[in-house]
Image (cartoon, helix red, strand yellow):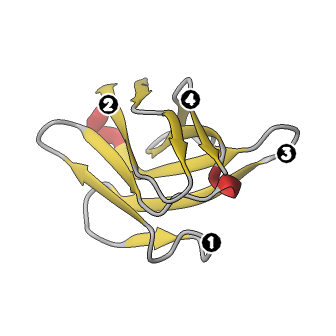
């Protein structure tokens, strides 16, 4: 199993920045892909960013391109989502997710709340 713990959420004004962190533990050698999802109130989780755990390929949703950056540190088993020029529509609970070998559903963190005030 893999355990994921997010941190770094908070309340910020429009145009501000936040950096989310995801700390992985357990069978981290099985991680193949690390992803960040956002869930706004009353809406489904949507994929915001993704990165190969063993490489540098990244994916960013069009809504965050040019503002968000996903990164990782394999030596520390952490991933991060740097969010700049935040907008009210970025508000939601952000979840870290790990796709791993041997599982179809992967593993989720508990989420961290991001609120962007206008």
* Contact check, label 2 and label 3, Cβ < 8 Å: no
Numbered tag placed on residue 63 in the rendering: 1
**Looking at this rendering, what residue extends furthest in the left direction?**
75
Sequence-first tag of 2 and 1: 2
Q: Is disc 2 surrounded by few (<14), some (14 to 19) or many (20+) residues within 10 Å?
A: some
Left or right: 48 in relation to 72: right
* Residue plotted at (50% across, 70% down): 60
Residue 42 versus residue 60 in the image, above or below: above
Numbered tag placed on residue 43 in the rendering: 3
Rounded to the nearest whole Å, what is the CA distance between mark 4 and mark 2? 12 Å
* Contact check, label 4 and label 3, Cβ < 8 Å: no
Sequence-first tag of 2 and 3: 2
* Contact check, label 4 and label 2, Cβ < 8 Å: no
Residue 86 point in image, percent of width and height: 53, 58
Numbered tag placed on residue 111 in the rendering: 4
Identify residue for label 2. Answer: 23
Q: Is disc 3 surrounded by few (<14), some (14 to 19) or many (20+) residues within 10 Å?
A: few
Q: Secondary structure at mark 3?
A: loop
In front: label 4 or label 1: 1
Which one is in front, 78 or 86? 86
Identify the image quadrant of residue 14: bottom right
Rounded to the nearest whole Å, what is the CA distance between mark 4 and mark 3? 15 Å
Sequence-first tag of 3 and 1: 3
Sequence-first tag of 4 and 3: 3
Residue 2 point in image, percent of width and height: 41, 27
* Contact check, label 2 and label 1, Cβ < 8 Å: no
Left or right: 104 in relation to 54: right
Residue 20 point in image, percent of width and height: 39, 41
């Amino acid at each position: 199993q893999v355990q994921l713990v997010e941190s770094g959420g908070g309340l910020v004004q429009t145009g501000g920045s936040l950096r989310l962190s995801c700390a992985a533990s357990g069978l981290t050698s099985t991680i193949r892909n690390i992803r960040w999802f956002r869930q706004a109130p009353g809406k489904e989780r949507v994929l915001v960013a993704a990165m190969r755990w063993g490489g540098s390929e990244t994916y960013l949703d069009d809504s965050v391109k040019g503002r968000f950056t996903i990164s990782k540190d394999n030596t520390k088993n952490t991933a991060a989502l740097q969010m700049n020029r935040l907008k009210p529509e970025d508000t939601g609970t952000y979840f870290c997710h790990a796709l791993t070998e041997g599982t179809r559903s992967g593993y989720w963190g508990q989420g961290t709340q991001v609120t962007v005030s206008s």
